[in-house]
Image (tube, grey):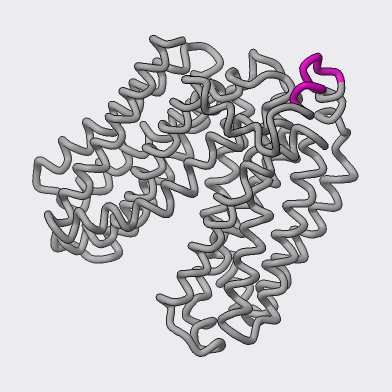
Amino acid sequence: MTALVSVDHFLSHVYLLALPPLFPILASVVETTVTRLAVAVTLIYAAQFLCQIPAGELVDRVGGKRVVGGGLALTAVSVGLLGFATSYRHVLALAFLSGVGQAAFHPGNYALLDVAGDAATEGRQFSVHTFSGFVGFAAAPALMTGLTAVADWRTAFLTVGAGGLLYAAVFAASLAPIHRRTIADAPDAPALATDGGQFESVRLLRRPLVAGMFAFFLLVTLADTGFQTYTTTLAVDLGHSTAVGNTALTAFLAAAAVFVLVGGWLADRYDGFAIIVASVCWSAVVLWAGLAVDLTPVALVLVWSAAGAGFGLTLPARDRITNALSDSADTGKSFGIVYTGLPIGGALAPVLLGQVIDVSGQAAAFEVIAALFLAAALVVLVLRRWR
């Protein structure tokens, strides 16, 4: 099951980055600008924000397999239909629909992983799942531009969409309804299915540990999105080329991906709270130390690699703690509510950090990013004491 769910996560991240590599071509086809096309990405995350909590509710009612399979099919069809887009409005509408499908992945995938393994290997399962998402991000630009070079941009979208739709069918045929059976057997399932109104996920925020993990997700996503958004502009501000900035960003993401796997091994053996505190503090300290000296191109890449390593180490422990907060019948709700911090952070970070840059400059924005890591560590310290 871990392999099936991880491939699904890979495809999810491919679809998240399917549009941007082809923005220059799409802009001329639908007669708009690249800047306006970027609204499509915003709509993907907006749809995730709006639909992720309902998706978590649905996971705990009908099972993760149905929700994930349906979400993948909807996203694949939406991306495939971009190959027929003839106007800016078509692109925006299909981007939003793909985001609706994307909302199913986190609550559904983690609910499936929860019932697939045991406590001794849970961290490693989560790390493989997260690593597959990093690989999806890395593969998307090459895949989309490669297919466009071999055929054309319409064929690229149609091919990627068809591949996802085919995998949705494989996923549905290969996966047993084990999560649905777990829900049916859970002693608290009837109460969860009938009490509390339409969205019981929001009630979970009354639990301090759930609310705290939501805050942690939000703070770390603000920092991560800041790295992804402004690393290249920082490199240019320091007098380096955009190639140096892109290399530093690649180093950050590559180190995070590698150390996700290390973090899974650690999360199965040591206290997850301690792993997170040590790792995000490491990222904050190396970033502050790097900004205090002359960041040559080599130094920039090394500092960003070190910060990415700390970020990657946190992720399996983060997911393991979130899963531990869930009862057998509300795993989808728990992950649905805390993972809502991701689209919120992703939407807010460019704007908030952009304001910092306008007032105090590029370096100040990354000092704030380091402070966000430190604030996330403080949140987890409080949660550890509360637990």
Q: Is 11 placed above or below 98 here?
A: above
What's the residue at 68%, 55% (across, down)?
Answer: 101
What's the residue at 9%, 47% (across, down)?
Answer: 294
* Magenta region includes residue 191: yes
Where is residue 346? Give x, y as percent.
43, 51
Instruction: Look at the image and tell me in which quarter the N terminus lies.
Output: top right
Q: Is residue 3 left or right of residue 231?
A: right
What's the residue at 64%, 82% (across, down)?
Answer: 152
Q: Between 302 and 359, which is closer to the camera in this rendering? A: 359
Q: Residue furthest left?
A: 293
Q: How many marks?
A: 0
Q: Is 50 placed above or below 43 here?
A: above
Q: Is 82 placed above or below 139 here?
A: below
Q: Between 340 and 13, which is closer to the camera in this rendering? A: 340
Q: Is residue 44 left or right of residue 271?
A: right
Q: Is residue 385 left or right of residue 121?
A: left
Magenta residues: mostly which secondary structure? helix
Where is residue 225? Give x, y as percent.
38, 50
Quarter of the view holding residue 133: top right
What's the residue at 65%, 14% (across, down)?
Answer: 119
Quarter of the view holding residue 150: bottom right
Where is residue 162? Give x, y as percent.
77, 65
* Magenta region includes residue 344: no
Where is residue 38? Give x, y as percent.
46, 70
The residue segment tinted magenta is 185-192
Q: Is residue 245 left or right of residue 129?
A: left
